[in-house]
Image: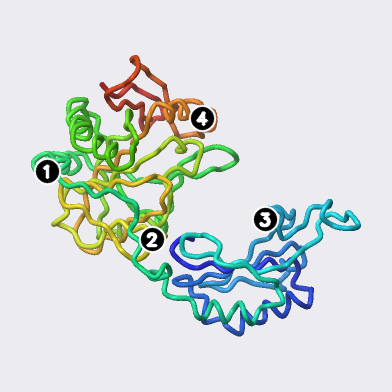
Amino acid sequence: MGGRYVLLCFFGSAGAEVAHQALAAVQAQRHLFDDAKVSFFGVSSDPQDQQGRVRQSLPGIRFFWDLDFALARRFGAVLPADAVADQRPNVYRPFWLLLDPMLRVLFSAPLAESEAVLQRVASLPDVGTHAGMEIPAPVLVLPRVFEPEFCRRLIGLYETHGGGDSGFMREVDGKTVPVYDYRHKRRSDMHIADPAIRAEARERIERRLIPEIAKAFQFRVTRMERYIVACYDSAVGGHFRAHRDNTTKGTAHRRFAVSLNLNAEEFEGGEVHFPEFGPRSYRAPTGGAVVFSCSLLHEAGPVTAGRRYVFLPFLYDEAAAAQRAANNRFLGAGVGEYELITRGQPQAEPQAVEPTPAGTSAEIGA
């Protein structure tokens, strides 16, 4: 939800008069909630509301069913028993909460102040100017990581061997599993199997990119995950909607993502965008990379003409490698286990073990 204002309404039950008035006020200002600038989320803890008393209305208006009061407790809408004079549990304190495009709290107000809250929402500045100035994303754009000839070799590998559907990771029943949904992501990936070519790619990353990460972010990369050439094809609407790269236990070890363009002059669209930091997008030149924290919300825009070829590794360190190994027990079917391999400390070269398509592991690295 980053990149837009979010208005949360903890109303508890639409059967309460103050909640009824608040929701009616939202409907009266329906035009404010378009999912582009502002989104509304109502939070109900009353099962009767699910029977049609309130309904989502897309775009812009949605509801959370918080029947166990988990959200209400987390956000302070339910007061702890020791804060209530008669010690009653689940005493509801309905209120409004407005978040800025970086998902930080702008203000809160009692639910009865609906008119003032919606007036403030109506006067919000555009998301790109909410700070009063442009906010550049904290990313590193680095040219000349791969030379053009090496880029063409990698593209040639893809064109020779082809790619397969690229999914994304989700937590399902406590396990990290791959999910495929073309509405969220449409991309094809080719895993580089040739050890010599992998070594060439790794050497360039080590010499030309890792020292710059140390300089810019004071982080010492020692390991690299994935050797893939990915293709966003305009013929099928190649894209990857807003996401973060480390939100599951199977991906929590990832520290930096690298988006290294292999043919920047041969496609249109496809820029990398960081919604929480405004509308600016980033497009590295051929052989150049955009490097950023895996915690940043980001998206690859639709490729509108041609094919975008890109090399997409993740980088991390020894502490994250130990975390990755410890999280093997949370990997679901289709995700190969990680084998932690050490060759003494400190390690000068990135190493990784990647799952093969069959889900097994093999050592990769120096």
Q: Residues within 10 Å of mark 1 (few under 14, many from 20)?
A: some
Q: Could you give the CA–CA distance between mark 4 and mark 1, rounded to whole angstroms?
A: 37 Å
Q: Amino acid at mark 2?
A: Phe
Amino acid at dot 4: Asn
Q: Quadrant of the C terminus?
A: top left
Q: Which residue is mark 1?
A: 152
Where is 174 relative to 270, above or below?
Answer: above
Q: CA distance from mark 2 to mark 3?
A: 26 Å
How packed mark 4 is, by other alpha carbons closer than 10 Å (few <14, some 14-19, many 20 or more), is: many
Across and down, in percent, residue 333 comes to: 49, 34
Q: Which mark is residue 277?
A: 2
The amino acid type found where label 3 is placed reads: Leu
Query: Where does label 3 land, which residue?
Result: 71
Q: Nearer the viewer, mark 2 or mark 3?
A: 2
Callout 3: SS: helix
Q: Mark 4 = which residue? A: 327
Most extreme residue toward the bottom is 28
Of pointers 1 and 2, the one earlier in the residue sequence: 1
Left or right relative to 168: residue 286: left
> Label 1 to label 2, Cα distance in Å?
33 Å
